[in-house]
């Protein structure tokens, strides 16, 4: 009777089908929890952002002081600001881990290609939202970061300058820029939330992947009460990690120059974006030509979109692909190198190291993914033929 009554209620039926009785592969591990962690981070960002917007003033003469007003005068304003600022970093940590897990276990492969593509769209929206949010405090790094990054659009032939003027709302980064960035920063998280719902719906259409990468239609159990406990453990550990930065190192992931009011007449000696942009920034800096740098960054995201369609391997999990596993961990190390290079001065040997790291990053998606599967097939057939010949000889 209880089951029938639930099915008669559309909302309860959706909750039951996707959160309670959702069939989950019995062998998934803790790495599958980063998806739900990313959802929690998004909720934290939206909630704290709404409350911060009540006290923020989007004007170049008042923005910096309104942020200080939140920190000093608004009751518990400091914790709202630190939750929001560090929450962006935690959101990217969860999403990056989620994506690396998908790369390692082949969760991007058919039939989950649409799920992966929606995830890349979410990543792009996150990057845009985080960038324009970084501009809002109107500190030195905010102002000059906005100036440098938006100026990259000028490298696009014919329409580049028009795009820059449209982004700025004038002929320089000024009050119109801050106002439109503020409006977009308030709107985009809700767009991310809507896209995340599509992402979850696409995932649940075919079900979750598993560490073996095999079809697990039979070996599934309900999400509740078995796997929510596993997710809960991840949430508690992640909350402790998050809390450490909020309460003990709230400014560790930021830049001290952003506590200086924006001054268009004084350029910082070294303009550095937030840490979660550094890998992109390092690739961008590795190309000496501005248009070439913009084109390579576009290529990076095109590769991410195309990943399910250029993949040539029929085996999903790295557990059965020893060569791919080594190249994957080399990619992880390569990303850490790019993050490190992105915060260094533009000089040798950092330029050369950044160029080598950028080449491997692109080679992984343009060479390893499309061709390694074919090489693995050839090696398997070769070993099978060799084994058959040896057995026939005996």
Image (spheres, rainbow, N blue to C red):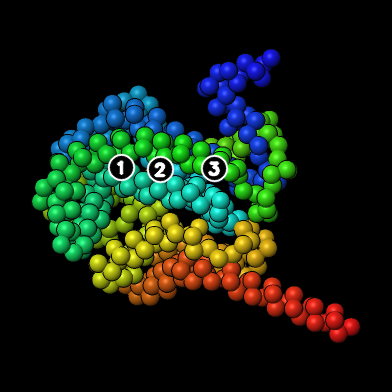
**Residue at coordinates 37% horizontally, 54% vertically from top-left?**
277
Q: CA distance from mark 3 to mark 1?
A: 29 Å
Looking at the image, is 73 positioned above or below residue 321? Answer: above
Q: Quarter holding the C terminus?
A: bottom right
Q: Residues within 10 Å of mark 1 (few under 14, many from 20)?
A: many
- Of the two numbered discs 3 and 1 in the rendering, the one whose residue sits closer to the viewer: 3
> Which residue sits furthest bottom?
393
Q: CA distance from mark 1 to mark 2?
A: 10 Å
The residue that disc 1 covers is 133
The reply to whether callout 2 and callout 3 are in contact (CB within 8 Å) is no
Position of residue 94 measured from the top left corner of the image (x, y, whole percent): 50, 46
On the image, which quarter does residue 50 sit in?
Answer: top left
Q: Which mark is residue 203?
A: 3
Q: Element type at marker 2?
A: helix
Position of residue 16 measured from the top left corner of the image (x, y, whole percent): 60, 26
Q: Which mark is residue 88?
A: 2
Q: Residues within 10 Å of mark 3 (few under 14, many from 20)?
A: some
Position of residue 1 measured from the top left corner of the image (x, y, whole percent): 69, 14
């Amino acid at each position: 009777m209880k089951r029938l009554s639930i099915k008669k209620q559309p909302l309860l039926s959706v909750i039951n089908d996707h959160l309670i009785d959702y069939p989950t592969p019995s062998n998934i591990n803790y790495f599958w929890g980063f998806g739900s962690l990313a959802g929690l981070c998004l909720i934290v960002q939206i909630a704290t952002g709404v409350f911060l917007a009540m006290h923020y003033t989007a004007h170049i003469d008042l923005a910096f002081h309104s942020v200080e007003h939140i920190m000093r005068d608004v009751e518990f304003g400091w914790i709202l600001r630190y939750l929001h600022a560090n929450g962006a970093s935690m959101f990217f940590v969860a999403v990056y881990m989620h994506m690396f897990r998908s790369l390692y276990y082949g969760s991007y492969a058919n039939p989950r290609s649409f799920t992966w593509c929606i995830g890349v769209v979410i990543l792009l929206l996150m990057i845009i939202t985080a960038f324009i949010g970084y501009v809002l405090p109107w500190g030195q790094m905010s102002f000059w970061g906005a100036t440098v990054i938006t100026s990259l659009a000028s490298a696009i032939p014919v329409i580049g300058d028009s795009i820059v003027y449209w982004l700025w709302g004038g002929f320089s980064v000024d009050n119109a820029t801050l106002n439109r960035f503020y409006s977009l920063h308030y709107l985009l998280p809700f767009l991310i939330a809507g896209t995340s719902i599509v992402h979850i719906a696409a995932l649940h259409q075919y079900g979750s992947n598993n560490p073996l990468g095999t079809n697990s239609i039979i070996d599934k159990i309900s999400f509740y009460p078995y796997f929510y406990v596993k997710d809960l453990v991840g949430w508690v550990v992640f909350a402790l990690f998050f809390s450490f930065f909020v309460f003990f190192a709230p400014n560790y992931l930021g830049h001290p120059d952003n506590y200086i009011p924006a001054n268009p007449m004084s350029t910082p000696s070294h303009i550095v974006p937030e840490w979660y942009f550094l890998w992109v920034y390092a690739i961008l800096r590795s190309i000496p030509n501005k248009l070439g740098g913009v084109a390579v960054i576009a290529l990076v995201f095109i590769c991410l979109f195309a990943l399910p369609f250029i993949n040539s391997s029929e085996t999903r999990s790295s557990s059965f692909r020893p060569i791919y596993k080594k190249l994957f961990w080399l990619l992880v190390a390569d990303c850490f190198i790019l993050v490190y290079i992105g915060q260094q001065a533009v000089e040798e040997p950092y330029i050369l190291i950044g160029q080598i790291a950028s080449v491997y990053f692109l080679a992984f998606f343009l060479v390893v993914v499309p061709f390694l599967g074919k090489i693995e097939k050839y090696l398997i057939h070769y070993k099978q033929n060799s084994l058959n010949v040896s057995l026939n000889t005996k």
